[in-house]
Image (spheres, helix red, strand yellow):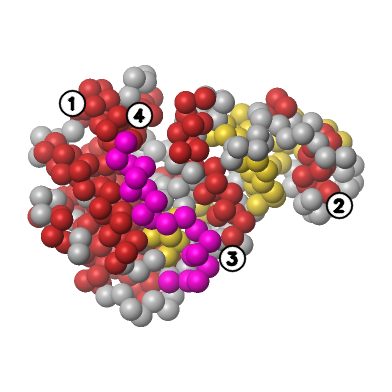
Amino acid sequence: MQQSHPRSGGDITVPWLNEMLVTKGGFSGAVIEFSLEPVGETAGFLGDIVRITLSWDIAGSQPNSIIAKFPTIREANRETGKHLLAYERELKFYQHFSEGCPVNPPTFYGGVDVTGEQDFLILIEDLKAARFASQLEALSTQDARQAVLGLARMHAHYWQSPALAEAHQFKDWAPIYGPSIASGWPLFEQDFGDLIPDEMYPMFEPGNRMAGRVFEYFSRARPQTLVHGDARIENICFDGSNLPRMYDWQLASSGPGAYDLMYFFANSIEADQLAVVGQELVSLYFDGLVEGGVTDYSREDLNRDLQIASCLLFGFSSMVGNFLANGGEAERAIVAATTPRYWGTCQFFEVGDVIEGLAELLV
């Protein structure tokens, strides 16, 4: 008998777990009891996450715990998540791209639409044994090297792949960013304007204005690969292997690999650190593409794409004003930690040289 699907952790039942993990998932034995533990905030921006610790009737290869990711219970945020296609993107990634992905995402145990209205719940591997980092602390250079190599391996693996036809397109963000920037920039400026460096402040207007065209340009004119879309510290962990493990695929799409690399720099590496090791990391990424079989993409192509991709940082900051403004100390701490990294990335890729004349480059 098919069980009704839970909309939050409190709705989970033993029969439902057995339907998902045994009947559909193929695990042997049966779940006899379970316990729940929230992961992170109980009500996240776009999703609510719980750890389910499982007891089985027989010993075997079954997982001792799994992660359930629900659409957030916050109505406004859930509608934003659906508008961004976040739940659909993540389910599609796990269904079509996770197996064999070089950055070893969590094992996928199943997904369902809990309401019938694109509110997708996913069950995935629990990565609790891995080492995690905080958004408020920059990565070590060694961890940064490992993450960059992982991105290069992933991007080379999916470079111009026919499988990308199953992914959302980078240009899908073009119509989404406009309204989100329009509502988010005044909030971001109001709450965090004092954190924006004076030299960076004038770049927000042209960056916001051109965001949609940049997304369209990258989809139309540049090589495509699988893009994580949110490649930052808190979506990467380390388990002792040579490559990182990446999770939270709610922004995955087919797009330019340079975006992931730029975004990783902007969210994970301090400005003074980037000035010292940035060129080494870009070279490591490029060499990883070549070693992975990419032959139609020069270092000059990469440098140009990184510079143009950096212009999207202004629209992204403006958009997240919708989520972080009118918050508390935690939200301000995130912006205070990341804004200097964003500015360091803009300086490193010399965004000031192109931001005003961006339209001329997008041909």
**Mark 3 to mark 1: distance in Å?**
45 Å
Q: Earlier in the sequence, mark 4 or mark 2?
A: 2
Estimate how packed mark 4 is, as few (under 14), some (14 to 19) or many (20 or more) residues with alpha carbons within 10 Å: many
Nearer-N-terminus badge (3/4): 3
Distance in Å between CA atoms under marks 3 and 4: 35 Å
Q: Which residues are magenta?
A: 160-179
Type of amino acid under label 1: Asp
Q: Which residue is mark 2?
A: 28
Residue at screen point 86% across, 52% down: 28
* Sequence order check, earlier mark of 3 and 2: 2
Q: Is residue 328 above or below residue 215?
A: above
The residue pinned by badge 1 equals 194
Please say if 161 is above or below 198: below
Residue at 39%, 66% (x, y): give it. 224
Q: Is residue 89 left or right of residue 311?
A: right
Find numbered disc 4 in the image and state the secondary structure of the residue it sits on: helix
Instruction: Give the Cα separation between the discs numbered 2 and 1.
Output: 57 Å
* Structural crowding at the residue carrying mark 1, measured as other residues with C-alpha within 10 Å and reported as few (<14), some (14–19) or many (≥20): few
Q: Earlier in the sequence, mark 1 or mark 4?
A: 1
Helix, strand or loop for disc 3: loop
Q: Nearer the viewer, mark 3 or mark 4?
A: 4
Which label was assigned to residue 322? 4
Give the residue at x 30% y 56%: 216
Label 2 amino acid?
A: Ser
Q: Quadrant of the N terminus?
A: top right
Q: Main secondary structure of the magenta part?
A: helix
Question: For residue 165: magenta?
Answer: yes
Nearer to me, 14 or 273: 14
